[in-house]
Image (cartoon, helix red, strand yellow):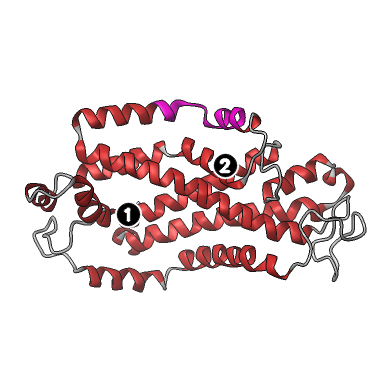
Amino acid sequence: MSEIAGAPGTADAAGGPEPTTERKTSEVLHFAVRNPKLLIGLGIVLSLLLLGIIGPLFIEHGPNEYVGPKSQPPSGEYWLGTTSFGQDIWAQFVFGLRATFLIGVFGGGVAFVIGTTVGFVAGYKGGIVDEILNMLTNVVLVLPALVVLIVITAYLEVRGVFIQGVFIGLTSWPWAARAVRSQALSLSTRDYVDLARLSGRRTWRIITTEIAPNMSSYLVMSFILLFGGSILIAAGLDFIGLGPTNGVSLGLMLESAMKWSSLYLGMWWWFIPPGLGITAIVGSLYILNVGLDEVFNPKLREL
């Protein structure tokens, strides 16, 4: 992770003035457009995201409709072939991309909000507040998250993308809270934070204007990791049959393909596209994160 810079206008460890915010932004952009890992990862993620958003607009039938002959390999009419029931796999893949990204947004977003809130409050307040929130974080951290999710989703009669994402987020925030807490704990002792505290500013005002901006790169990278983690967890739940009840996702495509023996029947076009889709999204998010780390961290830029 990149190092956390001090507040704009303060002196660095060597005693010299730090760059202004505009200069830092310009420097980050300069290295960002020249980092191949960041560009490749971002390009793949945006391409798949646009396909998931725009693709369904050009498909006349639903992903689960029986629209063609059964078990057909890819062709000009059916780009990714059809299932054993005559469903269009291309339509399922495009709609599944949309659901997969939504799961990442909901799950990663909920975990990010809870984790950063707990981390900032614990790191800034310290004392008894820090001990209570740290204990809560440790309790959730040691819970078998996947088992809890399986039990919860198994008893839900109706499961949707939003509900699944919320439950994933509620069990995925502890590590983000611990990471943010450690950074906030360090920044809360800086001179500019002490000055803001002495001026009588409210806690949330200090956190949002003095501490959080100096952790912006760290927060962005944390959200990306939570985003990719939510997608993997959701894919695992989908694969064991605990995904959305009335929908389609890449994980549900894999579950359906395995359930109806596509591998045994040699229908590679049924299980390879969703598997590659999940791998491409999560892999490109990892590459994107590595690229961002190199951009934000001056030490890594020199390598």
Q: Is residue 3 visible?
A: no
Q: Residue at x 36, y 52 (%)?
A: 219
> What secondary structure prevails in the magenta region?
helix
Residue 27: image location, x then y, percent: 29, 71
Residue 98: image location, x then y, percent: 62, 58
261 or 213, which is in the foreground?
Answer: 213
Residue at which label 1 appears: 2
State yes or no: residue 233 in magenta. Answer: no
Number of residues whose C-alpha sits closer than 10 Å to that of mark 2, classed few (under 14), some (14–19) or many (20 or more): some
Q: Is residue 126 above or below residue 51?
A: above
Direction from residue 18 to residue 177 in the image, left or right: right
Q: Is residue 1 above or below residue 182?
A: below
Residue 248: image location, x then y, percent: 70, 50
Front tag of 1 and 2? 2
| Mark 2 secondary-structure assignment | helix
Residue type at tag 2: Ile
Q: Residue at x 39, y 69 (%)?
A: 32
Q: Is residue 42 visible?
A: yes
Q: Residue at x 68, y 46 (%)?
A: 251
Residue at which label 2 appears: 163
State yes or no: residue 149 in magenta. Answer: yes
Residue type at tag 1: Ser
Direction from residue 278 to residue 90 in the image, left or right: right
Residue 4: image location, x then y, percent: 26, 53
Direction from residue 81 to residue 161 in the image, left or right: left
Q: Is residue 231 above or below residue 82?
A: above
Number of residues whose C-alpha sits closer than 10 Å to that of mark 1, classed few (under 14), some (14–19) or many (20 or more): some
Residue 5, picture quadrant: bottom left
Q: Is residue 10 above or below residue 85?
A: below
